């Protein structure tokens, strides 16, 4: 089973929407719709235009994982849309870890020194994943003023990449 990783744009919007909404709504019962996430219909305009990026993990031509970076200041970015299809999660394939590694490498190569993210309390495995990867939980009030908040998010993390080898 060969998993391929690549940058994705608007041509993958429908696949990304299908993957992400299924996980949010059906698996975790998060009350969020596509209307709450217009960025998914405008990947290039929302993520790529300002120096961020959007990556996908593919098995054959099927999108099975995503991660995105919103660059919101010269040296800061926000992780968004970190999702892996249920049957492909875990350490065996390590897809989430590889996606995060791609994002961190991109940040280091593009002058992004701090990355932040928001999540929801029900995504406990995601929280453990970020903590294992050196992210520190922070209060919402400690987020940079320009951080792109999502209404559903209640828990926030930060990682200073100056301390990353």
Image (spheres, rainbow, N blue to C red):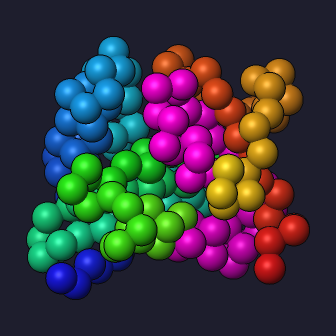
48 to 91, vertically: above or below? above
- For the record, the magenta segment spans 101-130
Residue visible at 17% across and 42% down in the picture: 18
Please give the name of the residue rendered at 31% of the width and 68% of the height, measured from the top-left corner.
57
Q: How many labels does the image show?
A: 0
- State yes or no: residue 107 in magenta: yes
**Residue 125 screen position, x and y as percent:** 49, 43
Residue 26 figure quarter: top left
Residue 23 in which image quadrant? top left
Q: Is residue 47 above or below residue 104?
A: above
Judge whether 3 appears above or below 141 on screen.
below
Name the foreground residue: 139 vs 61: 139
Magenta segment includes 129: yes
- In this view, the residue farthest toward the left is 61
* Residue occupying the point 54% across, 25% down: 121
Seen in the image, is 72 located left or right of residue 9? right
Q: Is residue 72 at least partly visible in the picture? A: no
Q: Where residue 70 sits in the image (x, y, percent)? A: 58, 49
64 relative to 7, above or below: above
Residue 137 percent across, percent down from the top left: 75, 38
> Is residue 124 something one can see in this rendering?
yes
- Left or right of residue 78: residue 83: left
Where residue 72 sits in the image (x, y, percent)? 68, 45
In front here: 103 or 14? 103
> Which of the 4 quarters of the picture holds residue 104?
bottom right
Q: In which quarter of the image is the C terminus?
A: bottom right
Identify the residue at image location x=44%, y=56%.
Answer: 67
Residue at the farthest bottom position: 2
Please state, as top left, top right, bottom left or bottom right, where the N terminus lies in the image.
Answer: bottom left
């Amino acid at each position: 089973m060969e998993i391929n990783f690549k940058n994705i744009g608007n041509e993958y919007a429908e696949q990304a929407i299908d993957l992400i909404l299924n996980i949010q709504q059906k698996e975790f019962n998060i009350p969020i719709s596509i209307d709450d996430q217009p960025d998914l219909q405008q990947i290039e305009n929302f993520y790529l235009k300002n120096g961020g990026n959007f990556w996908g993990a593919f098995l054959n031509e099927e999108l099975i994982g995503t991660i995105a970076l919103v660059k919101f200041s010269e040296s800061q970015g926000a992780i968004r849309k970190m999702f892996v299809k249920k049957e492909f999660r875990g350490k065996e394939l390590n897809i989430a870890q590889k996606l995060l590694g791609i994002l961190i490498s991109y940040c280091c190569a593009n002058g992004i020194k701090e990355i932040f993210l928001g999540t929801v309390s029900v995504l406990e495995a995601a929280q453990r994943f970020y903590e294992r990867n050196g992210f520190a939980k922070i209060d919402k009030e400690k987020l940079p003023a320009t951080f792109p908040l999502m209404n559903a998010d209640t828990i926030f993390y930060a990682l200073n990449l100056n301390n990353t080898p």
